[in-house]
Image: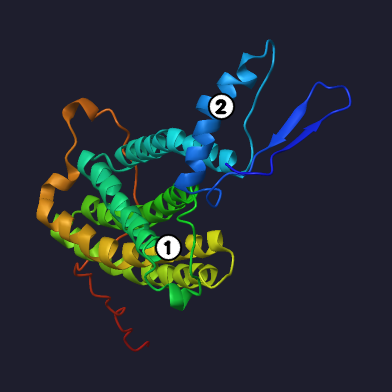
Amino acid sequence: MNEPIDVDVNPAKTVASVSIPVEGNGTDSTSNAALAALREEIVPTTLGTLEDAEVAVTGETAQSKDFNDQMKTVAPLVFGFVLLFAFVLMLASFRSLVIAAKAIVLNLLSIAAAYGVLVLVFQHGWGKGLLGFEYTGGIDPFLPILLFVILFGLSMDYHVFIISRVRESYDKGMSTDEAIAHGIKTTAGVVTSAAIVMVGVFAIFATLSMMILKQFGVGLAAAILIDATIVRAILLPASMKLLGEWNWYLPTWLEWLPHLEHGSSVERDEPTEPVTAPPALGPVG
């Protein structure tokens, strides 16, 4: 800490505000060490000895540290709730433990890839010249939770759309391999078009000057691009192909789950009855 230290007291002599400049930039390890010294050593041995006195340490460093600690506390609860809720919904919708578990794993892969891109760009500086920044101070503390919730919802949207077509085809009598091929073929255009639109929109955020919006745009654009190309177009059908009939595994003790219809019709390569013309009428008379 350093000078000058300012003390402001209200006219009633009941409240005092003590302003103490600290070393560091306000959010780095040096500033956090000063904050810890204030809260754990200096305040308890000075103001903490006053009877009936209430003491609080505030300021930029304290706000940043407390916010980060709060995010670390609630993040596991948010992640756990979203994952559990999504697993239960997928299990109830498709009556398959494998489909539900695989949806969670694939979505986590997309989100982990987005986190990796954010670290490479905004902590290690890859592409900072292209994006127009020099120093970010690290990734914003609340961004991982925000990206997790948004990306999980978007990824689940893709996943349910594709799996619904596959399950619909399987329920109509196709083999698992045929159902996978049919589901991927019929949804590829919609998934690709939606991904192009979202990547384009989110990429615009990466061009903005505000660092939180820049990080938000890069994370979302990278995640959607990876999810629509590698995860949904390659890993999803490949894993279903390898698992075969195990895709539809459901323990007997879960047979009470309701049967839900997935779609109303499926294109089938079945012969149709030829249309015959009505018999010609003979001459009258």
Looking at the rendered structure, the kind of residue marked 1 is Phe
Residue at x 11%, y 52% (from the top left corner): 244
Q: Which residue is at the front of the view, 30 or 96?
A: 30
Q: Which residue is at the front of the view, 110 or 69?
A: 69
Query: Above or below — where is 111 with respect to 32?
Result: below
Q: Which residue is at the front of the view, 170 or 230?
A: 230
Residue at x 20%, y 68% (from the top left corner): 269
Give neighbour class at mark 1: few <14, some 14-19, many 20+ (Cα, 10 Å): many
Q: Which mark is residue 216?
A: none
Give neighbour class at mark 2: few <14, some 14-19, many 20+ (Cα, 10 Å): few
Q: CA distance from mark 1 to mark 2?
A: 35 Å
Which is closer to the viewer, label 1 or label 2? 2
Q: Residue 188 placed where, x, y %? A: 32, 69
**Does the rendering let one see residue 164?**
no
Query: Above or below — where is 123 with respect to 52?
Result: below
Q: Which mark is residue 122?
A: 1
Q: Residue 169 placed where, x, y %? A: 25, 56
The quadrant holding residue 227 is bottom left
The quadrant holding residue 234 is bottom left
Q: Residue 173 placed where, x, y %? A: 19, 54
Left or right: where 51 falls relative to 155: right
Left or right: where 158 falls relative to 232: right
Instruction: Compare marks 1 and 2 and give the one earlier in the sequence.
Output: 2
Q: Which mark is residue 42?
A: 2
Residue at x 30%, y 31% (from the top left corner): 257
Q: Which residue is at the front of the view, 135 or 237?
A: 135
Q: Quadrant of the N terminus?
A: top right
Looking at the rendered structure, the kind of residue marked 2 is Ile
Residue furthest front in the image: 3
